[in-house]
Image (cartoon, rainbow, N blue to C red):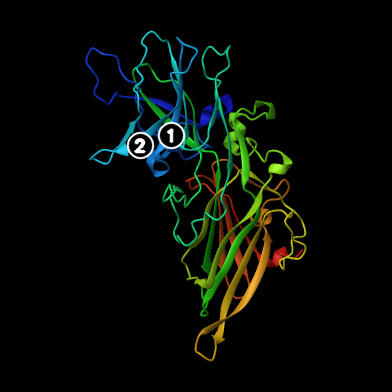
Amino acid sequence: MAAAATMFAACTQADFVNEVPEQGPKAIEFKNGYIGKNTRSENSSANYTLNFSKHHESFKVWGYKSTADEPVFSGKPVKVSFNDAGSEIYSYDGLVFWDEAASFYEFYAAAPAEHEWIFNAPKADDKSKSSGYFTTKITLDPERINQGKGAHLESLKPDNLEDGERNNDLLIAASCSPKIGNTVNFEFIHILSRLNIIVSKKPGMTQEVRTFKVSINNMNIYGEFNEDLTEKGITAESLAKGTYDRWSLGAEENVVKSNYVAVSEEGAVLQEGVERYVIQTLIIPQLAGYVQGVKINGEGLNENSAPYLYIEYGVENGKDSAGNKTFERFKKYYNLAEIFGKTTPGLAFNEGWENTLKLTVGPKTIDFNASVATWATSTYKENSLGHQDQNN
């Protein structure tokens, strides 16, 4: 795996856990897959967050040893299950045994197993077998946004793999060199980005407030990932700060843009002090460019515009003849990069970053609180922006 990725994954040794014949060879075993929660910090056990099973039920493994050029694992699926005590168990078909004559092993992993991963084998002159890397392509389904879940979802694991209610969260682990005979232990990282949109009611309002539509528009939903991008000067330090450079949109004819839309015909009722997650979704890492002149009334926007936020909401203004509540409706548009407080080159949806946008809806204004953080951490960059400043 490219040297730039090594700081994001750890390979630690653990005791051999499965029973094997006392005098026989030891099978290669896997245990304790974790998701690295912070791509900005140094590797340590403090960086571990959710267990692997919170995200996926399987991953694929590629493995090499010093005594052979051909792989000992070539994309073999490893399944995750649970024992009676609730601990994770990792298993695969067709046991592979340690070669005690080997001076080292090198392992790679990616998840989920059902995704179409392309593993590029280590170079022929690479004596350490550590130059392998992953490439892949993916088109996200913008309709899988977890609309109506309400609360924050710790993981975006699909509810039902057959129905595919959510997009797959893609994970990779850097190459790993355990001591021969010890359990192979991977730490995975997210290579997609995440976006959350939260709405709530402004404090002190007596009128009922509802949102009818919230959307993020003109987002790229197709991407091509290439882990080996040393020609772009990607280093461990640049990855730690955040990058989308390992992702591209492919040839011009492959570029696909779409909208992430949360809609409610009757309107979703907002409550004061209650954060309602209307969108939680995965995003292709990309630049969401900053463009001057985005009008709050939507004037001039088209399919080529920079990504922008649209919100349609209503404030209670009485009742009709049947006694049903009526609402004065408002429609507003905002440049997404401007909301996040960015200027040129604009907001970047970086690998493994979680971008959260909080909208507090009031009778005359929408207040924003935008944060960008590495996935599942509490380190934020914040700013607030009233919509009055968007009329330029």
Q: Which mark is residue 59?
A: 1
Residue 222 x, y percent position in the rendering:
62, 44
Residue 314 x, y percent position in the rendering:
58, 75
Residue 115 x, y percent position in the rendering:
50, 38
Q: Which mark is residue 170?
A: none
- Mark 2 nearby-residue class (10 Å; few <14, some 14–19, many ≥20): many
Q: Which mark is residue 80?
A: 2
- Whether 322 is drawn above or below 44: the answer is below
- Mark 1 nearby-residue class (10 Å; few <14, some 14–19, many ≥20): many
Instruction: Tell me the distance, in whole angstroms, between the alpha carbons under discs 1 and 2.
Output: 8 Å
Apparent side of residue 81 relative to residue 39 in the rendered image (left or right): left
Residue drawn at point x = 44 percent, y = 38 percent = 35
SS at mark 1 in the image: strand
The one of 194 and 42 positioned closer to us in this rendering = 194
- Whether 173 is drawn above or below 201: the answer is above
Residue drawn at point x = 51 percent, y = 14 percent = 128
Asked if marks 1 and 2 touch (Cβ < 8 Å), the reply is yes
Is residue 202 in view? no
Is residue 145 in view? yes
- Whether 71 is drawn above or below 311: the answer is above
SS at mark 2 in the image: strand
Residue 104 placement: quadrant? top left
Residue drawn at point x = 68 percent, y = 38 percent = 250
Residue 134 x, y percent position in the rendering:
55, 29
**Looking at the picture, which amino acid does disc 1 mark?**
Phe
Quadrant containing the C terminus is bottom right
**Looking at the picture, which amino acid does disc 2 mark?**
Val
The one of 347 and 42 positioned closer to us in this rendering = 347
Looking at the image, tell me whether mark 1 or mark 2 is earlier in sequence order.
1
Apparent side of residue 196 relative to residue 339 in the rendered image (left or right): left
